[in-house]
Image (cartoon, rainbow, N blue to C red):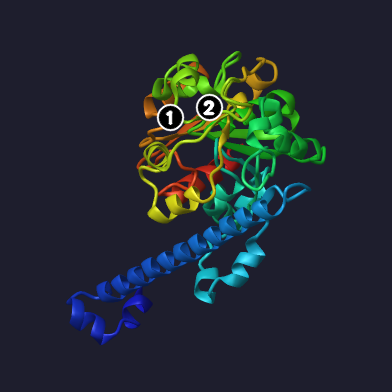
């Protein structure tokens, strides 16, 4: 305490009239400026990545491309100014040692891709955890035509492949956003021994025999009525055939997904989002008490969500109770979030639960 006041300058006392307030205010201002600079840099990198991925998808019409985003901390830190790179918040070593599962697998929602987790990836890596984001089939930079993705199994294949190739002695924490929650539920049913915990982020945590679309029915109407009347449907096999996909216009997308999101995040989404394959949304899940029912599930509610309202999320939790429920105020349906630090804090807390 004594050293704090001895180091205070006369200028601080003269400007504020109270010891320490001026210097503390300046430190706060510097911290805010540093945060804004870091946010700006992350935005530029993510937008650059999205545009590059879009250009690549236009250039190639086949072959294999990476579906994963992760393990980028060394590259990103080299790009950051020194004052930003030194601002990371590493968890104490004893906490990391006691965190049994450090690997996170991030599963995006409908229309999104691995790119949408860029803030979460950065924050998790900076705390010493190991995130991997996957592109589901027909999403992100996966070149599959969304019109050909007809089942939830097809849609979930990158996640299935990842879990099948996971070493026997390793487990992961799955995080599913929106309709990606159905892929997480499918994985819990078929790979229960490889998943330590599952986190449903404003997601379709549905029950046995339900479809992912059923969770959105209150906002979008019944599946039957929606597929008959929606002007947002696409018909990859011709107008005389059943609809194969769904793509909202920018105005509707903004209102449903990004009502609280920063403008730059919305701009990134508009150049990166792809049509939603309709088949997986209409696929019924078969879930058993012995596998899915015995899994460790957690739910994160977003309280300013227009796509999956708080009431609907509460209903999902009530009908299919998880082990724990967390809530984020001021958050919409976008996985970017206007408050990425809140999501990060919750994920770290879930990882530490014994």
* Nearer-the-camera pick, 8 or 243: 243
Q: Residue at x 39, y 48 (%)?
A: 261
Which is nearer the N-term, disc 1 or disc 2? 2
Q: From the viewer's perspective, tell me whether residue 71 is left or right of residue 310.
A: right
State the SS at label 1: loop
Reading the image, the residue beneath label 1 is 308
* Residue 55 disc label: none
* Callout 1 touching callout 2 (CB < 8 Å): yes
* Nearer-the-camera pick, 170 or 106: 106
* Nearer-the-camera pick, 168 or 40: 40
Q: Quadrant of the C terminus?
A: top right
Whole-percent x, y for residue 262 in the image: 39, 52
Q: From the viewer's perspective, tell me whether residue 5 is left or right of residue 101.
A: left
State the SS at label 2: loop
Pick out the residue farthest to the left: 17
Residue 146 visible to an observer of this rendering: yes
Whole-percent x, y for residue 111 in the image: 55, 39
The quarter holding residue 281 reads top right
The quarter holding residue 199 reads top right
Whole-percent x, y for residue 60 in the image: 72, 52
* Classed neighbour count for the residue bearing mark 2: other residues with Cα under 10 Å, few (<14), some (14–19), many (≥20): many
In space, the residues marked 1 and 2 are separated at their CA atoms by 9 Å
* Nearer-the-camera pick, 275 or 222: 275
Whole-percent x, y for residue 127 in the image: 58, 56
Q: Is residue 26 above or below residue 140?
A: below
Q: Quadrant of the N terminus?
A: bottom left
* Classed neighbour count for the residue bearing mark 1: other residues with Cα under 10 Å, few (<14), some (14–19), many (≥20): many
Reading the image, the residue beneath label 2 is 204
Residue 321 visible to an observer of this rendering: no
Q: Residue at x 62, y 26 (%)?
A: 280
Question: How many numbered discs sit on the rendered protein?
Answer: 2
Q: Residue at x 39, y 68 (%)?
A: 31
């Amino acid at each position: 305490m004594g050293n704090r006041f001895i180091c205070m300058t006369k200028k601080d006392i003269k400007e504020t009239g109270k010891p320490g307030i001026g210097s503390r205010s300046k430190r706060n201002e510097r911290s805010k400026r540093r945060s804004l600079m870091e946010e700006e840099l992350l935005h530029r990198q993510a937008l650059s990545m999205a545009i590059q991925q879009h250009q690549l998808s236009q250039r190639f019409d086949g072959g294999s491309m990476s579906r994963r985003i992760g393990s980028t901390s060394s590259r990103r830190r080299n790009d950051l100014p020194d004052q930003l790179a030194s601002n990371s918040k590493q968890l104490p070593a004893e906490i990391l040692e006691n965190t049994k599962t450090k690997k996170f697998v991030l599963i995006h929602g409908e229309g999104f891709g691995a790119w949408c987790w860029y803030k979460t990836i950065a924050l998790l890596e900076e705390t010493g955890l190991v995130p991997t984001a996957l592109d589901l089939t027909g999403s992100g930079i996966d070149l599959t035509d969304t019109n050909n993705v007809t089942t939830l199994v097809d849609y979930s294949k990158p996640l299935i492949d990842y879990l099948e190739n996971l070493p026997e002695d390793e487990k992961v924490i799955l995080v599913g956003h929106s309709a990606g929650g159905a892929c997480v539920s499918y994985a819990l049913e078929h790979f229960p021994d490889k998943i330590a915990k599952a986190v449903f982020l404003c997601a379709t945590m549905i029950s046995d025999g339900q479809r992912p679309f059923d969770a959105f029915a209150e906002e979008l109407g019944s599946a039957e009525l929606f597929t008959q009347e929606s002007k947002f449907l696409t018909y990859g096999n011709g107008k005389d055939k059943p609809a194969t996909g769904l793509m909202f216009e920018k105005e509707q997308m903004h209102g449903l997904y990004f009502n609280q999101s920063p403008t730059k995040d919305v701009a990134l989404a508009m150049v990166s989002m792809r049509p939603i394959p309709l088949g997986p949304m209409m696929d019924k899940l078969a879930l058993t008490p012995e596998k899915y029912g015995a899994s460790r599930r957690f739910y994160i509610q977003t309280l300013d969500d227009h796509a999956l309202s708080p009431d609907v999320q509460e209903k999902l939790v009530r009908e299919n109770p998880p082990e724990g429920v967390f809530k984020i105020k001021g958050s919409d349906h976008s996985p970017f979030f206007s408050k990425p630090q809140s999501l990060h804090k919750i994920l770290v807390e879930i990882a530490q639960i014994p």
